[in-house]
Image: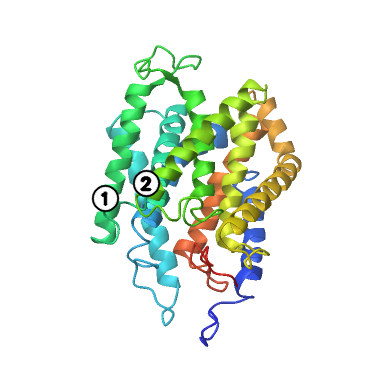
Amino acid sequence: MGNGQSKIGIGPEGRPGALIQFIVLAILAVVIFVYGFSPATIILTFLPASLLMLVSLGSLALMGDNFPLAPPGGNWNPTKSRVPAVVGMTAIFVAFTGLFLAFMHYVFPKWPISPLFLWWGAIAFWATLLYGINWNCWPFKGKMHPWATMGIGFAIVIVITSLVWTYLTNLAGTPLADSPFDHKGPLNVNWLTGFIVWAIAWFFIFNPVFITQGWPFTKWGHPGSALGQTVLSLILAYICWSGSLAMGVSPSFSFGAVASSLILWALVYSWHFQFWGITKLTGLSRAIAAFVIQCILAAIWIAICNVILRPFADSIAAAKLPADINILMIYLNLVPLATLLLVHNAFWLRWPLTLPNPPGTPPANQSV
């Protein structure tokens, strides 16, 4: 706001409104989407299917610019009610996800709901974020209709994912080893999934919108900066993932707790809280300060989650399901909580609370 325009929505504007939003949605995510369902439903159904939901969300929001009902690509403006955007974009999101899941389940490749969706979906989610955020749908964004860009981007994501899945993965050590789904490639799916989550964490840190706001590649132009961010993120992901395994850190703690919490807090601190407390800094100084704060918030969040999720994790252990508290944490971070935050801001425009600011506010070179 801040331009003489009357306030839209209830509650405080800016960061206080975002704090209210985060607290409410975090409580709902835990109460409804964790404790509201059985351990078997979450681990064996929700978690595998959720990756396709995240790909759908990324496609609509990142590649499709929230067309046709929410900004920046949709027709909403401050003179209109947000309710049509709330209803319409939610319906489109649910339909997209349902069709995507149904196609893969019933048409091709006809997989049962299983870890196959989790492993394949992790690759697809990584490709969606990489192409949709870091590469900003280069070279198509801004040159054609938003949904045309989304269609091309979605096709690129599916092709990349299918190539990686077919030629690079193997299912050794899993219940599906030596099955028709096992392509016997050079990379084990469990190792690759952990690496991918770490890669996403570093993508979120170095991309032009969140934590470092593109530093140190801001002068490289586009797509030069995207290439630099991609290469550095993959290198750091390999170091973090391989290094944590070499040190004997639990694999699920490394990617499930640490990497996913870094992803969540990159999103929350940069977009929702708009670099709270450090906006007088610019460039490198803001990037470093934001990264330090992100790490502190992630550590605090992991400690909180270990308390609030422990009873449910004990239920998972008692049921002898293939998961632990760290897998439950990545589920909470990326499925109900991150999805609710993204949908509520991007599609719902934070209705009925006051409007959110766009991602990347304030710019990296602007002190406020």
Amino acid type, mark 1: Gly
Q: For the residues marked 2 and 1, what is the alpha-carbon distance in whole angstroms?
A: 13 Å
Of callouts 2 and 1, the N-terminal one: 2
Count neighbours of disc 2 (C-alpha within 10 A) and say few if under 14, some if 14 to 19, many if 20 or more: many
Left or right of 296? Residue 242 is left
Residue 120 place in picture, x, y as percent: 41, 31
Q: Nearer the viewer, residue 54 or 206?
A: 206
In the image, 49 versus 225, the foreground residue is 225
> For the point 64% across and 75% down, which residue is it?
12
Left or right placement of residue 270 versus residue 313 in this view: left
Residue 38 seen anywhere in this rendered image of the structure: no
Q: Position of residue 223 (x, y in %)?
A: 34, 50
Q: Which x, y percent locates residue 357?
A: 52, 69
Find numbered disc 2 in the image and state the secondary structure of the residue it sits on. helix
On screen, 183 above or below 348?
above
Q: Position of residue 333 (x, y in %)?
A: 59, 45
Identify the residue shown where x is 74% and y is 37%: 311
- Bin the neighbour count of mark 1 within 10 Å (Cα to Cα): few under 14, some 14-19, many 20 and up: some
Q: Is residue 120 above or below residue 301?
A: above
Q: What amino acid is labelled 2 in the image?
A: Tyr
Indicate the quadrant where residue 279 lies.
Answer: bottom right
Query: Foreground mark, 2 or 1?
Result: 2
**Which colour style is shown?**
rainbow
Q: For the residues labelled 2 and 1, say whether their Cβ atoms are less than 8 Å apart.
A: no
Give the residue number, with chain letter if any, for mark 2: 131
The residue that label 1 is drawn on is: 151
